[in-house]
């Protein structure tokens, strides 16, 4: 950037700007293109500056308000101003070091006033503050700060581990709450289904007993009309004894049953008939209560 070139002509490429001196004193800026110089008059091309955008990554280590050490990675994009290229050429020997120094100064003055969580949420504000301060300072030296990006915020490894554990514990707690609510709903639905099942089962049993009662009533009336001199009680006893023997027969014919001991005799048959009759009467009473 400080080399001297004594030639009659020079070509400045696109996206560059030349600095022309006369006898070691700045004279003018040379735009891209072919330029003719007069060495005899002390005129020459002192140097060329690029007007492209440069990117500079700066890593800053600092401490937050809650005493957590963090590293911030900033990406600064800057360029030389064409109209002030002479300032950029003569004023700063190492612009990158100057930019680093100002970034360090602004970040280390701002971040210690913020908690770690606030820093993550407001990293855009930090980048904005750096851009404003750096833009004012570097503008006087012929540089324009185009963008500043806060690329990454890296806390101390132990702090990151603790933050992950806190996050995991919160998610487990939330999962436990959802699981408990799901089990509660499941138990309520299971109880409702069981209650509905028992109700429907009771209705079905009542209807079954009512159907048996209606069938027996029709059989008794039909038998009484066809056989003169028989009472309803006698017909009922006959039907009960017939069903009793049918039951014993089914027990004996079933291959799934082993030996079954039941009391049997004329007296026991009469007792069974009384028990069946009582059961039918209770079924009729239950049906009336349901209706």
Image: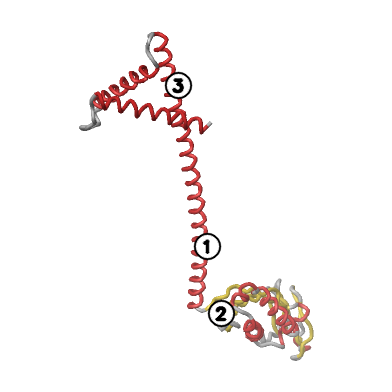
The residue under label 3 is 214
| Mark 3 element type | helix
**Side of 198 relative to 245 (left or right):** right
| Quadrant of the image containing the N terminus | bottom right
Residue annotated with mark 2? 71
First along the sequence among labels 1 and 3: 1
Circle 2 SS class:
strand
- Residue pushed farthest left? 259
| Circle 3 crowding by C-alpha within 10 Å: few under 14, some 14–19, many from 20 | few
Residue 129, quarter of picture: bottom right
User: Residue 87 or 23: which is nearer the viewer?
Assistant: 87
Between circles 1 and 3, the one closer to the viewer is 3
Q: Which mark is residue 174?
A: 1
Q: Position of residue 96 (x, y in %)?
A: 63, 83
Residue 127 placement (x, y as % from top left): 67, 76
Asked which secondary structure carries label 1, the reply is helix
């Amino acid at each position: 950037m400080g080399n001297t070139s004594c030639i009659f002509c020079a070509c400045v490429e696109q996206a560059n700007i030349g600095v022309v001196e006369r006898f070691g004193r700045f004279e003018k800026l040379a735009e891209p293109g072919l330029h003719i110089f007069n060495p005899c008059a002390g005129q020459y091309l002192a140097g060329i500056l690029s007007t492209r955008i440069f990117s500079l990554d700066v890593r800053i280590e600092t401490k937050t308000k809650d005493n957590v050490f963090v590293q911030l990675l900033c990406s600064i994009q800057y360029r030389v101003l064409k109209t002030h290229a002479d300032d950029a050429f003569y004023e700063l020997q190492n612009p990158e070091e100057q930019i680093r120094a100002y970034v360090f100064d602004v970040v280390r003055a701002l971040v210690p006033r913020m908690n770690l969580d606030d820093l993550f949420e407001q990293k855009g504000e930090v980048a904005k503050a750096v851009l404003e301060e750096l833009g004012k300072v570097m503008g006087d030296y012929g540089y324009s700060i185009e963008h500043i990006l806060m690329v990454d915020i890296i806390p101390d490894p132990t702090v990151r581990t603790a933050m992950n554990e806190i996050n995991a514990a919160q998610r487990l707690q939330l999962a436990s709450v959802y699981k408990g609510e799901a089990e509660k709903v499941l138990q309520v639905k299971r109880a409702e289904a069981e209650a509905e099942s028992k109700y429907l089962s009771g209705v079905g049993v009542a209807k079954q007993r009512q159907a048996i009662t209606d069938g027996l009533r029709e059989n008794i009336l039909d038998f009484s009309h066809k056989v003169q001199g028989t009472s309803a009680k006698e017909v009922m006893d006959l039907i009960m004894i017939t069903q009793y023997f049918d039951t014993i027969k089914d027990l004996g014919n079933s291959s799934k049953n082993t030996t079954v001991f039941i009391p049997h005799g004329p007296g026991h048959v009469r007792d069974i008939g009384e028990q069946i009759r009582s059961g039918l009467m209770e079924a009729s009473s239950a049906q009336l209560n349901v209706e």
